[in-house]
Amino acid sequence: MIYNFDQVIDRRGTNSLKYDFMVERGKPEDTIPMWVADMDFAAPPEVLEDIKNAVYHGVFGYTEPKDEYYQAVSNWYNSRFHYHVTQLETIIAPGVVYSLAQTIRALTNSKDAIMVQTPVYYPFYNIITGNGRKLVSNPLVYEKGKYSIDFLDFERKISENDVRMFILCSPHNPVGRVWTWEELEIMSDICENNGVIVVSDEIHCDFVWEGHEHNCIATLNENAIVTASPSKTFNLAGLQVSNIFVKNAQYRETLKAEIEKSGYTQYNMLGLIAAQSAYTKGLDWLEQLKTYLAENISFTREYLKSKLPMIRLVEPESTYLLWLDFSGVEQEQEVLEKRLTEGARIWMNNGEMFGEEGKGFFRLNVACPMSTLREALERLEKEFG
């Protein structure tokens, strides 16, 4: 089947966070939203068909996954990332952020230190400090247009702060890095030597671009916990389904008990159906989608080079979220955001929401039809060109 990603789907009037809350969030009504990390493409038709069949059945009672669900999930991660996980080692949850929050509550104590690598996905901050833990930052190093890890700072911060847990963003959102084996090995060894629990958010693992390969840190560190979901890969975020992979039996039982205390014991029926369907029938759709997204990224890269050279694309190794360096514009962050919002009428994520290291940057979501992307870049050129 050939899938049509050029189709423009009108998402207004669906209570879409991305499209239907412009005015409430202080944006002009005709703004092009390119911020929140969902896609403007319909989910795979094979998945939609399975959801439709469940809807037409008409009964939405309490649901548990059968063996086929776990096998579909296991096959996906084993075949793509050489990471084998069993049904016993898999915990189902409504979302990755929820999973991370429950892992923090289960495996750390109040005022324990938890480390992240900034700038990083902003909910990390909320689930750490909101649960009464101490936030420790190992800032990524930005040099010559690329990010790297300061391992000396990484190890020093762990020692000085008695860090209990490290939340790894892999691939990294928003900077787009895919961590190499060598980088993962160094981080894993430091954590193991210091008794630090590694929890890896791998929600973007299916979007890795040519020349790079996603490596799951849990293949190096059996005590590492992995949180993952089909939500980004197949545009299923609203169906609220994710998986936590926990090989350490003690961690797993403690985490399951914490989740049960939260009152979450049953699963979203349509989410389970969609996830199983996507992992068994969605590969062809995904491969065509990745080709389309790679073309969108290439178009953005060339457009910026030729018409907006003062805005630099931080070369993405993964994700459909592009990290744009506006430092060449030489204006304050508030001024830049106002020009984007009121002048260009484009809604991008302000880099500062990912941490102070995000100052001078904005995040652009290119998971949309080419026509939408082209119009957004033309508006950007008109304002900054």
Image: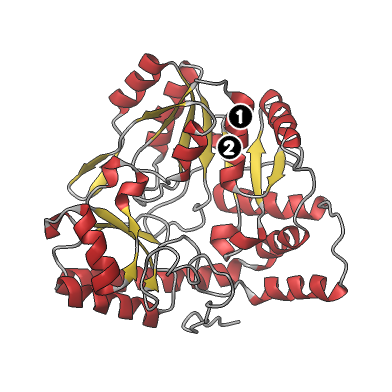
Q: Which of 55 and 76 is in front in this view?
A: 55
Q: In which quarter of the image is residue 235?
A: bottom right
What kind of element bears circle 1?
A: helix
Question: Which residue type carries mark 2?
Answer: Ala
Instruction: Give the class, few, some or many, for how many residues have Cα within 10 Å of label 2's Cα (few <14, many ≥20).
Output: some
Residue holding disc 2? 101
Q: How many labels does the image show?
A: 2
Instruction: Indicate the position of residue 154 as horizontal and vertical percent values.
Output: 34, 26
| Figure check: 170 above or below 275 | above
Using residue 83 as the reference point, say whether residue 321 is left or right of it. Answer: left
Looking at the image, which residue is at 72% across and 55% down? 72
Instruction: Indicate the position of residue 231 as horizontal and vertical percent values.
Output: 59, 58
| Figure check: 62 above or below 123 | below
Instruction: Give the class, few, some or many, for how many residues have Cα within 10 Å of label 1's Cα (few <14, many ≥20).
Output: many
Using residue 382 as the reference point, say whether residue 213 is left or right of it. Answer: right
Q: Which mark is residue 202?
A: none
Looking at the image, which residue is at 19% across and 59% down? 335
Using residue 32 as the reference point, say whether residue 197 is left or right of it. Answer: right
**Which quadrant is home to the C terminus?**
bottom left
**Which quadrant is home to the N terminus?**
bottom right
Q: Which mark is residue 105?
A: 1
Q: Which of 229 and 295 is in front in this view?
A: 229
Q: Nearer the viewer, residue 228 or 33?
A: 33
- The answer to whether residue 82 of the structure is visible from this angle is no
Question: Which residue type carries mark 1?
Answer: Arg
Using residue 186 as the reference point, say whether residue 300 is left or right of it. Answer: left
Q: In which quarter of the image is residue 325?
A: bottom left
Looking at the image, which residue is at 44% across and 56% down? 208
What kind of element bears circle 2?
A: helix
Asked if the residue at tag 2 contacts the one at tag 1, i.e. Cβ–Cβ closer than 8 Å, the answer is yes
The color scheme shown is: secondary structure
- The answer to whether residue 142 of the structure is visible from this angle is yes
